[in-house]
Image (spheres, rainbow, N blue to C red):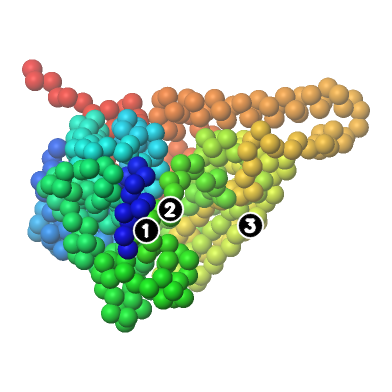
Amino acid sequence: MSSANSAKRAHKPFALVDCDNFYVSCERVFAPKLRNRPVVVLSNNDGCIISRSAEAKALDIKMGAPLHHITALIKSANVAVCSSNYALYGDMSERVKQTLKQFSPEIEMYSIDEAFLRLPANPELTLCASDIHQRVLRWTGIPVSIGIGETKTLAKVASRIAKTSPSRVCNAFEQTSLEQTSLERIDRDKLLAETPVTKIWGIGKRHGTWLKAQGITTALQLRDINDEQIRRRAGVLGLRTVWELRGRSCLPLTMTIPTRKGVTCSRSFGRRTRNREQLREALATYAARVGEKIRRDGSAAGALTVFLMTNRFSNEPQYSKSALLTINPPSDDEKTLIQLALAGFERIYNANYRYQKAGVTLTDLTPINEVQTDLFPPSQTSRAPEKRETNTTQNAAEHSKSLSHILDSLNTTHGAGTIRYAATGIDKPWRMRSNYRSPCYTTHWSDLPLIPTLY
Ligand SMILES: [Mg+2]
């Protein structure tokens, strides 16, 4: 398909910036001893491998492999093991984003370690991408790979090739209007011919099998497929992918964060437990955590769900139950959320089982400034001398609300958990395993890296 006509219009290229082995890279920024050796990062509760350095991939350590399956290899190959540290990764992701904003205000954080950028039309595109690579590395310590194309799908295809290129940049942008020098971009047909069809964004295994049966195994063959044939099989979404491969942009940049439907905090326990106090502490902690999240978003919740479950992989008797409580009027107040979570717990707790996991979910989220206040709050329905009493109750509610915000700002300034409700526990023996966790170098004052004194 010729793109000569559309090329007359100046078209801004899409770039996909992808952090290399992101969690491992974050760990390496502050721990030079992790460089040039195999490193893996584990999922919550130190379960499975979720990020691998290039050296670990070379050892054939698979993504998702359970840690206990590869203990021998870890020992013999001297692999460094890290528990996941999401406070660190989230903060590093934010730093990468802030750096990328220097290059374009049009940015979509697609995931914690990937961002789409709309770059200004620029004849020196490859140079610009190298500049992005250099600056992100210098300012944050995180290495990135960058793919460029007319569409998001093409940028994604290019970024896959960029990962194996020494410059970490792959420029597949072809539009002639930019008069790029032919040296600096790669032959797009060749790029598409080298990309297996299953590696294309949005194709996946399901359509991949069918395409293979049609004799289509590369991105190039898919690009040249008959429109009707793909639409019949894969619908409009499939057709959109094909058009994107041809350089026709169908997926715009999504710059607004979609409003969340719900927020959950749930964790596995380090050890199974039936201990009532421990379970209450865990649920109070999770309720505090989801409260913090919705306050950051400026939302209030209209419903709270608590759940408890046993370990479904064990031979012990199984139990799993949840309770839904409405919050009226919707609230973001920490004390209210903790009290409701504990009330829900009392409804579902059964002392005959040992629990592996628990969680709290908030739903029916609305912006806090749109919350309808209750016309007849419970305190106002009581008889005289209402006036004073009502004021006192309302003031108490207001105080509690502003207290939540004060807690948030103290915890932001001085580190998570500096001030918290006693209900959330102190020693937290139920906490999930994270035996190899690195310090929160960038979000906790007490975890700041120290330079050893020489004298
Ligand atoms: Mg990545």
Q: Disc 1 residue type? A: Glu
Q: Does the rendering let one see residue 143?
A: no
Amino acid carrying label 3: it is Ala
Do the numbered discs 2 and 1 sit on residues whose CB atoms are within 8 Å?
A: yes
Quick one: label 1 or label 3, which is nearer the N terminus? 1
Query: Where is residue 304 drawn, in percent x and y?
Result: 62, 49
Say how many tags the image has.
3
Q: Are marks 2 and 3 in contact (CB under 8 Å)?
A: no
**Circle 2 sits in a helix, a strand or a loop, which is it?**
loop
Write the residue at 42% across / 67% down.
Answer: 238
Report the side of 191 relative to 400 (left or right).
left
Mark 1 nearby-residue class (10 Å; few <14, some 14–19, many ≥20): many
Per the rendering, the mark at residue 244 is: 1
Q: Real-space Cα distance between discs 2 and 1?
A: 8 Å
Residue 84 in the figure: left or right of residue 296: left
Between the C-alphas of marks 2 and 3, the distance is 40 Å
Question: Residue 430: x percent and y percent?
Answer: 43, 49
Q: Residue at x 16, y 43 (%)?
A: 181
Q: Which mark is residue 251?
A: 2
In this rendering, the answer to whether 289 lies above or below 102 is below
